[in-house]
Amino acid sequence: MASEVALNPLQVMVPALLLGSSFGSAAALQPSCLSAQFRRPGDYILGGLFPFGKNTVNLTARSEPTLVVCERLFIDGLIWALGMKFAIDQINNSTSLLPGVKLGYEMYDTCSEPVVALQPSLLFLTRNGTTGIGVQCDYTDYQPRVAAVIGPHKSDLCLVTAKLFSSFLIPQVSYAASSEKLSNAELYPSFYRTVPSDKNLVEAVVQLLNKFGWNWIASIGSDDEYGRGAQELFLSIAGNHSICIAFEGLIPTDLSDPKAKDQLEETITSINRTKVNIIVLFSFNQPAQAFLEHSIRMGLSKKVWIGTEAWMFSDVAAYIPNIQSIGTVLGFVMKVDNVPGFQEYVADLFASVQQDNFCQESRKLSDLMSSDMLGTQCSECDHISLQDVVPILSRSQIQPVHVAVYSVAYALHRALGCTHQACPKASIPSWQLLHFMNTLPFTVNGQTFRFDPSHNTNPGYKIIFWSWKNGTLTYLPVGDYEEFLYINKSQIWFHTADQKEPTSECFRHCKPGQFRRIKGFHLCCYDCTDCPENTFWSTKDSSTCTPCLEHQWSPVRSTQCYVRSERYLFWNEPLTIALLVLMSIIASLTCLTAVLFYKNLETPLVQASGGKLNLFALFALSLLCLSSCLYIGKPSDELCMIQQVISSLCLNGCLSTLFIKSLEITLVTECPRCAPTFLPWVTPRRAWLIVALCFLTECAFCACYLRVGPDSLVSDYKSLPTEVLLVCNTQSWLAFTLLQGYNNCLATVCFLCTFMVQTSGKKYNLARGITFAILIYFIIYIFFIAVFATLKTVLRSVSQIGGILATSLSILGTYYLPKCYIILFMPDLNTTEHFQISVKEEPEDNSQ
């Protein structure tokens, strides 16, 4: 329930007490006729369902469907009923709202029990002028006893009666029921209410908890539709706002049950174990009273209690012995205005019901309603005086009842087509009023109201604080809530030693870049842990960190991801510059060697080394050096495909000339008998044919490499923490082996052909230069393969460049540079006899 109360009761209580004093003499001991004031005839009848009584006889003891009676008078219900009577009397006396039309009413007791509320509800559904309900397929032309129903006040009663009235589409306007279930206009199309739903209340409570940073709380609800529904909503919404419910429980509403005491004590014991400092209590006044009494008796430590008007303004709850020991009480009540003239109206009525003439006329009008089957069941109303009502009257919420009656009156005004002078008296089926209640707003005492699509009104809430001064309780307004919460903390004196708000946290709010690591029994108890690398904190108090996308990265404890920069071998980095300088030196030496060989092409040394084949080999070697530039800069799929191809073809050009020279040396030194037959094939003229054949063979292997699986560009996001590594990845090691294998075979043949060759000490040993060149090439190649297969960074490109330059330098240094030295510094050795290789060469004389 979310019915509201006046926020400053002193402003209301003072005139009420004055009225009570004025009319106190009229409150005689003899019975009055107040019970005869709840039925009046009229052109259109409004039904009223009010809790005149409470504490019904134990329903479980019923063995027959007899009438259920209440044991005690509930003065709040009586005042609400008088509020409806006051509103109808105002409307009947109005000359503009329903001129010429008189509203009648019938009010009945619900005893706050659904089974009791059903009896008058069935009476309201009877055909007008009869006591029976017609069973029909179509109720379009059916005219029930009442045009609309005001009440009842509790959600569990409304959930029963709203189904009943909705089947006939009779407008029902509750002045206090707040269950969110009743907001379903499809299930309850004719149900309206002049109070907010529990969802609005729960959202207000959650904002209050967040305002103070309270995230470790207990939630208690009464075991009825209001308590269960409000608590269920609260648990759902609180969980979405990082509020941890340490304990949730229900307290019994039937306090006569022998198990009720044990259930209350068990709930309080459980709250003690959780060590929370905040308790949210959704309950009516009687269960709340019992819970608070047991909390005091069991010595529950002081807490902050967040309540609702269902118990906040209960005289019984507020004046429990030692109630101040429970701690700090904050609560929400609906914003309501005073209804002008109501207290004077009540005072006049209590004076009138003591007069015989008035009572005779009242009973005569009441008897005209011909409802002998049901009395108002408010016989105790005739035994109370104004002094009994004044304390409740000072805080009772009449405006929701007042507005409910006026909403029906305005709908009648529009349905009848009234003007400010007159209303036609026509037969208006109840269901036709619904359209007019859904559409236009209406004004009551200068304040405008309208029903939202869920048939609710939402005037907002006031936040009140129980302020105790010298043992006197004052309901102090400290804030308000409509869509957003405002609260004046300076007006709240908490129960703590410094009167500041207490803390109630199982966890601290994690800092940006941290996630919640669950610990302990409660899922919302956790430690704050930094988000690891490549993850980021995306939601406040999130329980996980969100991984960055593949192309992004983040440091530890990050709140966002950053785009990875591309990483490859840049032209301007120091290592690249050093390699380029080395490449330039080796390429320059190769070119200078080629120039020197060209100028000394006809000398014995150059001719013995291969003649013009040397120029081709040096040209291929220089291209091999320059091919290292293909591994610098941003790679692409096309570049990755040609890198290995070009370097292999250039190396093949150099190795093929060494292959020819190795064959020549082997034929002369190891196979002198076969030399005359095969030497012509390695002479300069036919040697070019072998070079071309070797080159074409390597081209064929390059084509296979491109077909089977060439290198391709791969974006590596794992090797580097903040960058994406762009590398040429070897797709097929078979293709790589085909490409490199042929050159290695040529190198192997060269090595085998020259390794065992011996010449006279007087002769220049050409075979040794080839042997050492190939041997160093193999060493470099073994290291290159080991490094190339394991590296995943930019050093992979460096290893390829280093392998190319080392191979070029090894061949140049071991085979060509020694010959350059002889040409430049030992020209006397550059003679035919030192470089004569023929089958006629005599072995060295060892006779000495």
Image: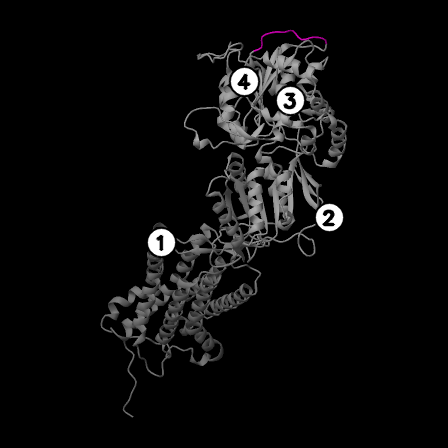
Side (left or right) of 398 relative to 275: right
Q: Is residue 242 above or below residue 358?
A: below
**What's the colour scheme?**
one colour
Q: Position of residue 389 (x, y in %)?
A: 67, 30
How many angstroms separate mark 1 from mark 4 (CA)? 87 Å
In front of the other: 845 or 425 = 425
Q: Are marks 3 and 1 in contact (CB under 8 Å)?
A: no
Circle 1 or circle 4, nearest the eye? 4
How many angstroms separate mark 2 from mark 3 (CA)? 38 Å
Circle 4 or circle 3, nearest the eye? 3
The C terminus sits in image quarter: bottom left
Residue that label 1 marks? 705
Residue that label 4 marks? 170
Q: Are marks 4 and 3 in contact (CB under 8 Å)?
A: no
How many angstroms separate mark 2 from mark 1 (CA)? 98 Å
- Neighbourhood count class around disc 3 (C-alpha, 10 Å): few under 14, some 14–19, many 20 upward: many
In the image, farthest residue toward the left:
673
How many angstroms separate mark 2 from mark 4 (CA)? 51 Å
Residue 553 is at least partly visible in this image: no
Residue that label 2 marks? 470
Q: The magenta stretch spans which residues?
A: 421-428
**In terms of sequence position, does the residue under pointer 4 or pointer 3 come before the other?**
3
User: Was residue 754 drawn as part of the magenta stretch in this picture?
Assistant: no
Side (left or right) of 438 relative to 14: left
Q: Position of residue 149 (x, y in %)?
A: 57, 20
Occupied quadrant, residue 799: bottom left
**In terms of sequence position, does the residue under pointer 2 or pointer 1 come before the other?**
2
How many angstroms separate mark 3 from mark 1 (CA)? 108 Å
Residue that label 3 marks? 34
Q: Position of residue 764 (x, y in %)?
A: 37, 79
